Image: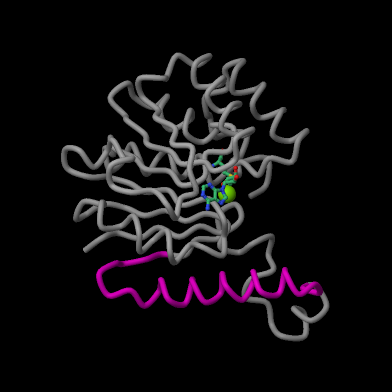
Amino acid sequence: MNDYFLNLNSTNKNSLIKDMYRYAKDNNVPIISDEGLVYLLQLIRLTNAKKILEVGTAIGYSAIQMAMIDENIHIDTIERDMDAYNIAIFNINKAKLNNNIHVILKDGLTVTKNDLMGTKNYGYDLIFIDAAKAQYKNFFNLFTPYLKKGGIVVCDNLMFHGLVGLPQDEKDKQVTTKNLKGLVRKIEEFNEWLSKQKGYKTDFLRIGDGMSVSVKL
Ligand code: SAH
Ligand code: MG
């Protein structure tokens, strides 16, 4: 997206948000793209989502942005990295959102129903998957049983810096290391798999680093 449109989009830019944004850029924390954020927040407003599960908290940037929409929003968010977790807790306290955001310090794949506050009543309205890209299928399978019918799953970074879905000759040039090759293949497999999930209608959007939006049918 060019900056002209981006500048027209107003997102909350209080001093905490500005500090977090700067911190993320200075420390290579892969927070959601500006455009992805605008879209995600609007989805939450449009669908009136109140119970949200996020996989991949990092420093709490996207969770705080989502929780600032509305005081009735409750977010469970999962982070496995202790340093990121501590920074997220600090930021969430600073934002006075500790009643709205519950951070779970665990590997997402080991999270059980008991860890998830949002499962206590009726499950989630929206699940935002934004952690280890090779695990998306596992996260999807693990957490979507807790998603309400009509609920939404958003997955981030499905184009992985534009490396996903390239024609083979371009891929050979740009995707050189073994690790990267494996990761790109995993994301491509996930995209393909997701597009064929019978219980969901999924759109793949060229927003930010590539985002999918699936509705549970
Ligand atoms: N959603 C955040 C960015 C998350 S970056 C935002 O937009 O502001 C991805 C985060 O996922 C990293 O902090 C990483 O430590 C975490 N992560 C990666 N794999 C994970 C896993 N298996 N379980 C829990 N967290 C994981
Ligand atoms: Mg992301």
Q: Quarter of the image holding residue 90?
A: top right
Residue in view at x 67 percent, y 47 percent: 2
Bounds of the magenta segment: 175-203
Can you name the residue that lies furthest to the bottom here?
168
Magenta highlight on residue 193: yes
Magenta-span inclusion, residue 190 = yes
Where 160 sits versus 92, above or below? below
| View extreme (left): residue | 121
Between 81 and 156, the one lying in front of the other is 81
Above-or-below relation of 54 to 187: above
Image position, residue 149 (x, y; %)? 19, 55
The answer to whether 143 appears left or right of 25 in the picture is left
Residue at the (37%, 36%) spot, across then down: 76
Q: How many marks?
A: 0
- Spot occupied by residue 142 in the image (x, y as percentages of width and height): 35, 59
User: Between 52 and 6, which is closer to the camera in this rendering?
Assistant: 52
The structure's colour scheme is one colour
Look at 74% across and 41% down and name the residue there: 28
* x and y, in percent, of residue 182 in the image: 66, 74
Quadrant position of residue 122: top left
Dominant secondary structure, magenta: helix
Q: Quadrant of the C terminus?
A: bottom left
- The picture places residue 57, in percent across and down from the top left corner, at 52, 39
167 vs 78, left or right, is: right
Towards the viewer: 104 or 46: 104
